[in-house]
Amino acid sequence: MSAFQPVVRVSGTAVAVPGDDIDTDRIVPARFLKAVTFDGLGDALFYDERHAPDGGKKGHPLDDPARAGATVMVTGANFGCGSSREHAPQAIRRAGFRAVVGGSFAEIFFGNATGIGLACVRLEEGDLADLTRRVQEDPTLVVTVDLEAMRVEAGGRGYAASMPESARTALVTGTYDPLAELLEGLEDVKRTAAALGHEVRR
């Protein structure tokens, strides 16, 4: 029994947010970290990149009406670098994205993303550039991230993808959240604790 629904394949339209070294402060500005829960954090995604000081829109790709409902984000290398804030992948997921395709990912960001079922896969530079161009040109292009085949498919063209095997296994088996796994096994924990003379309260 898995802790969450397995993440085997993500398919949908995409938004390209190109550029290398996009850090977590750009993904979700620090002032939004005061939230008690992650609810509504999707509204903070790239907030300062999307809004002028007076609140007006800057014309960011995320605000393109043709991109509404996109579930795949395509970006550059070293995505999620900087501060190790778990709010960054939470904001991406709560904005409706289920996968991020990039050149590489900062280690802590990648771990936080995997822990909430947000699939982050890498493409080689030339393939990523080609996919980015095609996504920018066609808002109707359907991009599929297949974690079993480890490929990204888009409009009849495929790209070899990669991610650490441990993360891939956790996603496709639905065992990517260790806390949820622990809670699933709570009765076993209680029985073991009782046998040791302890009590587990919850």
Image: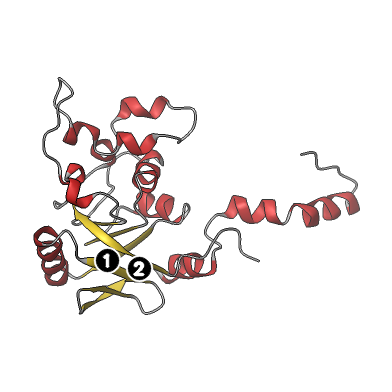
In this orientation, does residue 74 appear?
A: no
197 or 18: nearer the viewer? 18
What is the x, y in percent for residue 72?
29, 58
What is the x, y in percent for residue 94?
39, 44
Label 1: how many Cα within 10 Å (few below 14, some 14–19, many 20+):
many
Q: Classify residue 23 by image quadrant.
A: top left
Query: Does 148 sit above or below residue 195?
Result: below
Give me the residue at 15% from left, 21% from top: 53
Give me the residue at 85% from left, 54% from top: 191
Label 2: how many Cα within 10 Å (few below 14, some 14–19, many 20+):
some
Q: CA distance from mark 1 to mark 2?
A: 6 Å
135 or 90: nearer the viewer? 135
Q: Secondary structure at mark 1?
A: strand
Q: Identify the coloring.
A: secondary structure
Query: Does 193 sit above or below residue 168?
Result: above
Q: Amino acid at mark 2?
A: Met
Q: Classify residue 8 by image quadrant.
A: bottom left
| Residue named by callout 2 | 163
Query: Does 122 sit above or below residue 25?
Result: below
In this orientation, does residue 149 appear?
A: yes
What is the x, y in percent for residue 132?
14, 62
In which quadrant will I find the C terminus?
Answer: top right
Q: Amino acid at mark 1?
A: Arg
Whether residues under marks 1 and 2 lie with C-beta atoms below 8 angstroms apart, the answer is yes
Q: Classify residue 123 by image quadrant.
A: bottom left
Q: Which mark is residue 122?
A: 1
